[in-house]
Image (cartoon, grey):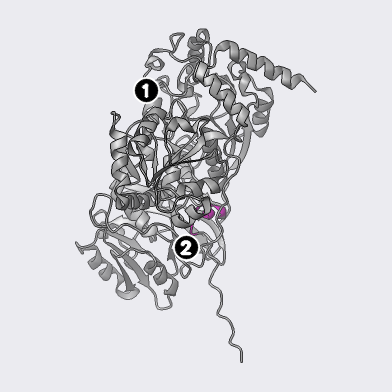
C-alpha cells in the first residue's frame, strides 16, 4: 500500500522556510564590530493548550544566533513567569513571538545589530502576512496606531531596561506593544526595512489606497542619479502608490538653452498627481523653472541626488564658497558639466532660489546627513529639507560563492581583488589621481584590480594586474563582479551619498573611503568598511592594512550585508518617504504602510527573487568615439567651451529636422 504524501507547508514565499537550505553568505561574526559580545536575547512565546509550535520553534532554531533562549510559557501562569524573565539582569533584549508566527531568516542578527549601532530601545521590522500565500508586507500596527489592536509586540526587539512590566505587561503575560512603544522617545525607536516576522492571517487584509505620484527626471533613468531615481519610484510602487514616469527631454545637448517642456508638462498635469517626485533634472535643463511652474498645481519634492538645485550651475561646489553668497560669473568651472555661460550664472542662481522659496516651495529630500546639512545651509530660509533613504535591490546585490563567481568570470582564484566602480571611473569628482596613487602603492603579485565603468585609457591606472570589464548595464551581472572581489575602494570626495559602497556592501564586500561628504553615511565606519581622513597617504596605508588582513575583510563584509540590508532596502526607502508624506499631510497618520507581495522578492531568502534591471548605464562607446574623447581630453581636459556646446546644439537641431 502506497503511503500518502505529507501535506505541503504553507506557501510562505520564503524558500522552504523554515526547513529549506540556508542562504549563501558570510557567517555572522562571533562578536560585534567593536569586539563586544552580541546581545543576549530571550524570546517569549505564551502557549495555549492547542498551540501549534513546530514551525515557530524551528524558525527560532534556524536563526544562527547562539546568544539566545526561547521560553515557552504556559498561559495559566504567564504573567508571573514573564515578570521573572524581565527581572533577570542577564538578559539584554526580549522578543515576544506568538505561537504560529515565524521569525524570518536573519531577523535576530539584523535587529540586534541595529539596536547596538543606534542605541535604540526598540527595533521593529517588517511583517510578512500570509495564510497559504503571501498577501502583503507591513510595518507593525503599534508603530502607527497607538492603542490599536496589535498588542503582542510579536517580532519586535525590546531592550529589557526599556520595559516597565507594571505598565506594559498584560495579565496573560503578553506585551502591550502600543503602550511600550508610545512611551519611548522617538529617537529610541527604530524600524528596519527588512522582514523579521511571518504572521499567519485569519483573513486577507484590505488593499492599501496609495497616492498618485509622477516620477520626473531630466533625460531618463540611466547613470547613477537616474538609477537612484528609478529605484525610489519602484519602491513607492511596491508600497501601493501609483507611479507615472515622465522624462523632460531626450535632447541633452540643448539643456543649457531649454527651460520649457510643453509635452512633459502637459502629461504631468493630465495625470493630476498628488505629488511630483523630481530628481536629476540638469541633463535636460539648467534651471528649476519647470519645478516653479509645477509647484503651483500641487506638491513637488526634489530629490537631492546632487546639489545642482542649490547652486548657480554645478552639481558639487567642492571647495568653492560662492553658492553660499551667490554664484556668479566668477564660477571656477563654467565649462565643466553641467556647463553654463558665465554671464548667465548669477541670474540662474537667483531664479533657482526663487523657485525654492515661498509657502508652496518644493521639499528638498536629502539622502544623507551631509546632504541634509548642505541643503539647510544653501537653500533659502524656510525651505523644507527632509531626510530620506535611497532604495537598492537587496535581493539582486547579495553575497555569493566567491570562488564560483571568480570561475565564472575568469578571475584569478587566489588573488586579493580590489574593486573600483563608477559610471566614469576617471571622472573629475571620483578622485582618480588619489585612487591611482593608492593602487600603485599596494601593487604586487597576488593583488589585482577590477575597474567597472568607463575608463577610456586603462593604462592611466598603471596597474599590471587589471581587469576592466567596462560599463555593466545589467544589475545581476554587476552584482556578480562585486561579489567576486574582496574589497571596494573609492577616492571620491564629493558624494551626496555614494551608491557603489552600498551595492558592494550588500554583496558582502567592505568599502574603504575618505571620511567626507555623504560617504560617511554610505560607509558605516568599522561596520561596513573603513573611513580614513582626507590626507596624503591615508588611503594607501589603510588599503595595505586591509589587503593583509583577510579576517577583517570577511568580518566587515558580513556586517555590511546585515546593516545595509536593514537601512537601504526598497522597504526602508518607502518607509522614509512615508514619514515625509505624513509630516506634510499627504497621508493619514493612522494609515499603516503596506507593501505588495513582490516586495518580498527584494530579499535573498524569498522563494521568488526580483530580477535585476538591465540598461542601467549607456552602452559602451565605439572605439573611434573613445579615441576621439581621449584626444579631446588631451587638448581641453574635461572642459566643453561655449563655442563647442553651441555647435553641438545646432548639430542636434539639424539632425532632428532631417527626415
The residue at which mark 1 appears reads as 377
Q: Quadrant of residue 471?
A: top right
In the rendered structure, find residue 199 and report the number of the disc placed on it.
Answer: 2
Rate crowding at label 1 as few (under 14), some (14 to 19) or many (20 or more) other CA atoms within 10 Å. few
Q: Which residues are magenta?
A: 598-605
Residue furthest out toward the right: 659
Picture residue at 53% right of the left edge, 29% below the top = 280
Picture residue at 38% right of the left edge, 61% below the top = 152
* Total numbered labels placed on residues in the image: 2
Q: Find the distance from the CA under tag 1 to the CA under tag 2.
A: 45 Å
In this rendering, the answer to whether 197 lies above or below 145 is below
- The answer to whether marks 1 and 2 mark residues whose Cβ atoms lie closer than 8 Å is no
Residue situated in front as seen by the camera: 500 or 563: 500
In this rendering, the answer to whether 194 lies above or below 74 is above
Q: Is residue 602 magenta?
A: yes
Left or right for 345, reference 164: right
**Quadrant including the C terminus:** top right
Q: Position of residue 261 (x, y in %)?
A: 65, 22
Picture residue at 59% right of the left edge, 14% below the top = 644
Left or right for 227, reference 445: right
Rate crowding at label 2 as few (under 14), some (14 to 19) or many (20 or more) other CA atoms within 10 Å. many
Label 1 sits on a secondary structure element that is helix
Q: Position of residue 593 (x, y in %)?
A: 49, 48
Amino acid at each position: 500500500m502506497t503511503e500518502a504524501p505529507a501535506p505541503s507547508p504553507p506557501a510562505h514565499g520564503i524558500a522552504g522556510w523554515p526547513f529549506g537550505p540556508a542562504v549563501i553568505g558570510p557567517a555572522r561574526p562571533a562578536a560585534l564590530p567593536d569586539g563586544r559580545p552580541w546581545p543576549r536575547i530571550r524570546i517569549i512565546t505564551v502557549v495555549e493548550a492547542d498551540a501549534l509550535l513546530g514551525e515557530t520553534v524551528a524558525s527560532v532554531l534556524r536563526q544562527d544566533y547562539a546568544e539566545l533562549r526561547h521560553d515557552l510559557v504556559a498561559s495559566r501562569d504567564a504573567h508571573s513567569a514573564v515578570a521573572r524573565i524581565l527581572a533577570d539582569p542577564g538578559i539584554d533584549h526580549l522578543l515576544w513571538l506568538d505561537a504560529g508566527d515565524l521569525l524570518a531568516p536573519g531577523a535576530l542578527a539584523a535587529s540586534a545589530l541595529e539596536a547596538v549601532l543606534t542605541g535604540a530601545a526598540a527595533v521593529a521590522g517588517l511583517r510578512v502576512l500570509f495564510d497559504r500565500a503571501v498577501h502583503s508586507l507591513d510595518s507593525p500596527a503599534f508603530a502607527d496606531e497607538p492603542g490599536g489592536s496589535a498588542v503582542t509586540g510579536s517580532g519586535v526587539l525590546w531592550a529589557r531596561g526599556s520595559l516597565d512590566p507594571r505598565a506594559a505587561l498584560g495579565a496573560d503575560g503578553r506585551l502591550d506593544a502600543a503602550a511600550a512603544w508610545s512611551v519611548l522617545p522617538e529617537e529610541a525607536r527604530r524600524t528596519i526595512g527588512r522582514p523579521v516576522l511571518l504572521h499567519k492571517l485569519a483573513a486577507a487584509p484590505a488593499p492599501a489606497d496609495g497616492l498618485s505620484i509622477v516620477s520626473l527626471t531630466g533625460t531618463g533613468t540611466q547613470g547613477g542619479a537616474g538609477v537612484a531615481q528609478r529605484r525610489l519610484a519602484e519602491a513607492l510602487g511596491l508600497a501601493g502608490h501609483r507611479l507615472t514616469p515622465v522624462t523632460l527631454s531626450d535632447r541633452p545637448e540643448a539643456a543649457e538653452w531649454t527651460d520649457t517642456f510643453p509635452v512633459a508638462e502637459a502629461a504631468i498635469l493630465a495625470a493630476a498627481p498628488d505629488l511630483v517626485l523630481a530628481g536629476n533634472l540638469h541633463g535636460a535643463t539648467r534651471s528649476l523653472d519647470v519645478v516653479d511652474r509645477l509647484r503651483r498645481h500641487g506638491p513637488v519634492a526634489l530629490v537631492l541626488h546632487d546639489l545642482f538645485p542649490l547652486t548657480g550651475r554645478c552639481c558639487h561646489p567642492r571647495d568653492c564658497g560662492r553658492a553660499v553668497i551667490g554664484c556668479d560669473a566668477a564660477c571656477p568651472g563654467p565649462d565643466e558639466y553641467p556647463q553654463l555661460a558665465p554671464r548667465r550664472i548669477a541670474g540662474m542662481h537667483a531664479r533657482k532660489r526663487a523657485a525654492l522659496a515661498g509657502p508652496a516651495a518644493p521639499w528638498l529630500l536629502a539622502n544623507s546627513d551631509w546632504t541634509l546639512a548642505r541643503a539647510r545651509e544653501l537653500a533659502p530660509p524656510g525651505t523644507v529639507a527632509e531626510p530620506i533613504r535611497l532604495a537598492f535591490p537587496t535581493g539582486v546585490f547579495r553575497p555569493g560563492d566567491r570562488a564560483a563567481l571568480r570561475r565564472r568570470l575568469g578571475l584569478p582564484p587566489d588573488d586579493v581583488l580590489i574593486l573600483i566602480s563608477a559610471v566614469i571611473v576617471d571622472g573629475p569628482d571620483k578622485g582618480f589621481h588619489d585612487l591611482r596613487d593608492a593602487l600603485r602603492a599596494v601593487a604586487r603579485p597576488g593583488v589585482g584590480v577590477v575597474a567597472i565603468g568607463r575608463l577610456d585609457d586603462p593604462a592611466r591606472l598603471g596597474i599590471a594586474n587589471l581587469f576592466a570589464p567596462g560599463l555593466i548595464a545589467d544589475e545581476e551581472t554587476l552584482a556578480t563582479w562585486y561579489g567576486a572581489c574582496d574589497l571596494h575602494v573609492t577616492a571620491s570626495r564629493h558624494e551626496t551619498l555614494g551608491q557603489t559602497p552600498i551595492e558592494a556592501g550588500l554583496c558582502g564586500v567592505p568599502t574603504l573611503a575618505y571620511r567626507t561628504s555623504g560617504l560617511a553615511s554610505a560607509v558605516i565606519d568599522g561596520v561596513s568598511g573603513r573611513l580614513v581622513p582626507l590626507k596624503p597617504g591615508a588611503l594607501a596605508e589603510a588599503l595595505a592594512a586591509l589587503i593583509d588582513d583577510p579576517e577583517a575583510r570577511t568580518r566587515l563584509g558580513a556586517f555590511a550585508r546585515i546593516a545595509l540590508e536593514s537601512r537601504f532596502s526598497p522597504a526602508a526607502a518607502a518607509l522614509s518617504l512615508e514619514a515625509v508624506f505624513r509630516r506634510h499631510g499627504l497621508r493619514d497618520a493612522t494609515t499603516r504602510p503596506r507593501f505588495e507581495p513582490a516586495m518580498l522578492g527584494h530579499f535573498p531568502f524569498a522563494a521568488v527573487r526580483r530580477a535585476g534591471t538591465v540598461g542601467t548605464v549607456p552602452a559602451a562607446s565605439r572605439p573611434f568615439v573613445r579615441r576621439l574623447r581621449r584626444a579631446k581630453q588631451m587638448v581641453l581636459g574635461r572642459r566643453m567651451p561655449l563655442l563647442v556646446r553651441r555647435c553641438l546644439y545646432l548639430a542636434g537641431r539639424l539632425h532632428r529636422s532631417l527626415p
